[in-house]
Image: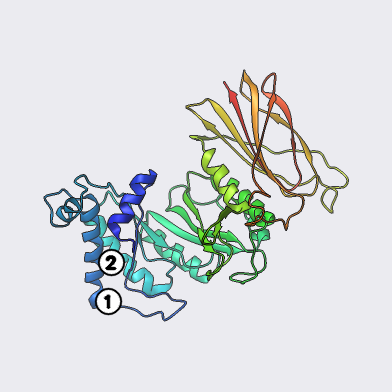
């Protein structure tokens, strides 16, 4: 099994921040919904304190000495801790408040992650946000499993979030091709493009959305309990889905600064039903170290879009623009064990002569453009 020590080691090996999620005295509310009595909650809070000491305490402390005895003398430096997963209602708020009071008094350096429930917009969600805002929560975990249309329609979800309020961890999300929790859901190109479009909205609002996590990560072809999954395997083979390549492209093309971006276009026949040109979704960031502007653009339509790109405020750009495009022939295409890279990024390069250049965005595509600009 995987214990806390192995978990912290794995995070260290991956160069990832550990973020354990602890039981807050509540069972899964979709199953039994069993609650630990409030008079027994102190033992759960003590477990959290002990874990912090195990992860971060000196080797001379009780739990730090246990870590050292296991072979890791130095603290792991844990900074994030979740209190409950996908919990909701007054019972959760009452328990979270007790955890937060003790943990913030003893360990103000630890950022606590609280739960907004299982859905992105219902009474449970609204109640959680109102109460957690009153409690001055650090980070609130939002979950969303929905149809691709929901993701396309909600790319501006975080534009109006309070910049002074709690930050967001989009802790579980995935587009559902058929219905939420349907065994017939598939990792289609449409779902991947919907998630990519939504992620441009999260990236544009990176001052609010601190973290995001597709879920679930793995599925075994012969022993799964949920679909879709990011990566599929059997006993001998593994393949990444189109959704996996979306996550990979975002992960490998992060920036330090979010740049303002404007999408504009003239009306065009043959586009949307009302005569508009195909709708695009985009974000822009700058990598300060490489001096590159990184553009991410989603074209979910069946038409190639010739785009004119203007890097306003840049005196020089180029001489090469690197384009990685994820695209397919139709929105229902998927990867498989037999054809694991049917939908996978393809790299193209073209020479440019300055901060204004043209780029064709393929139909049904997610494209990442990188160009040096000063």
In the rendering, at what x and y percent does residue 258 appear?
53, 37
Measured from the top left, where is residue 282 in percent x and y? 64, 42
What's the residue at 26%, 51% (across, down)?
A: 108
- Who's the residue at 37% across and 48% down the image? 17
Residue 216 appears in view: no
Compared across the picture, whether 264 is left or right of 157 comes to: right
Q: Is residue 10 left or right of residue 74?
A: right
Q: Which is more toward the observer, 78 or 234?
A: 234
Question: Badge 2 is on which residue?
Answer: 98
Query: Which residue occupies the extreme right position in the image?
Result: 269
In which quadrant will I find the N terminus?
bottom left
User: Where is residue 41, by image quadrant?
Assistant: bottom left
Q: How far apart are labels 1 and 2 at the CA level? A: 9 Å
Q: Quadrant of the C terminus?
A: top right
Report the number of discs: 2
**Which mark identifies residue 269?**
none
| Coordinates of residue 303 in the picture (x, y in percent) | 81, 45
Location of mark 1 (residue): 38
Q: For the residue labelled by badge 1, is the local secondary structure a helix, a strand or a loop?
A: helix
Question: Is residue 32 positioned above or below 161 on the image?
Answer: below
Badge 1 crowding class, 10 Å Cα cut-off, few under 14, some 14 to 19, many 20 or more, is few
Q: Residue at x 47, y 77 (%)?
A: 30
The crowd level at tag 2 (other Cα within 10 Å; few <14, some 14-19, many 20+) is some
The foreground one among 246 and 156 is 246
Q: Is residue 71 visible?
A: yes
In the rendered structure, are the residues bearing label 1 and label 2 in contact, judged by CB atoms less than 8 Å apart?
Answer: yes
SS at circle 2: helix
């Amino acid at each position: 099994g995987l214990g806390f020590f192995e978990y912290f080691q794995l995070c260290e090996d991956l160069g990832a921040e550990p973020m354990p999620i602890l039981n807050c005295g509540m069972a899964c509310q979709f199953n039994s919904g069993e609650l630990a009595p409030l008079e027994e909650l102190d033992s759960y809070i003590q477990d959290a304190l002990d874990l912090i000491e195990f992860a971060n305490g000196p080797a001379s402390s009780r739990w730090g000495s246990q870590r050292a005895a296991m072979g890791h003398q130095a603290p792991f430096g844990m900074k994030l801790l979740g209190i409950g997963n996908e919990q909701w209602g007054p019972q959760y708020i009452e328990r979270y408040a007790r955890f937060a009071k003790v943990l913030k008094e003893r360990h103000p350096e630890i950022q606590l992650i609280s739960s907004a429930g299982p859905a992105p917009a219902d009474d449970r969600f609204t109640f959680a946000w109102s109460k957690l805002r009153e409690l001055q929560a650090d980070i609130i975990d939002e979950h969303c499993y929905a149809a691709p249309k929901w993701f396309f329609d909600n790319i501006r979800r975080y534009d109006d979030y309070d910049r002074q309020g709690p930050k967001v961890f989009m802790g579980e999300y995935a587009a559902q091709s058929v219905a939420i929790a349907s065994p017939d859901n598939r990792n289609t190109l449409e779902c991947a493009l919907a998630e990519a479009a939504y992620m441009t909205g999260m990236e544009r609002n990176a001052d609010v959305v601190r973290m995001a996590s597709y879920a679930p990560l793995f599925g075994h072809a012969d022993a799964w309990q949920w679909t879709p999954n990011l990566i599929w395997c059997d006993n001998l083979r593994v393949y990444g889905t189109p959704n996996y390549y979306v996550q990979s492209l975002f992960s490998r093309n992060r920036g330090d600064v979010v740049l303002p971006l404007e999408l504009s276009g003239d009306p065009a026949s043959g586009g949307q039903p009302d005569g508009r040109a195909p709708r695009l979704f985009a974000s822009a960031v700058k990598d300060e170290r490489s001096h590159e502007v990184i553009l991410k653009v989603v074209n979910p339509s069946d038409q190639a879009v010739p785009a004119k790109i203007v890097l306003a405020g840049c005196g020089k750009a180029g001489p090469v623009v690197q384009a990685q495009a994820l695209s397919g022939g139709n929105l229902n295409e998927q990867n498989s064990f037999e054809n694991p890279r049917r939908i996978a990024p393809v790299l193209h390069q073209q020479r440019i002569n300055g901060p204004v250049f043209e780029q064709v965005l393929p139909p049904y595509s997610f494209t990442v453009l990188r160009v040096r600009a000063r």
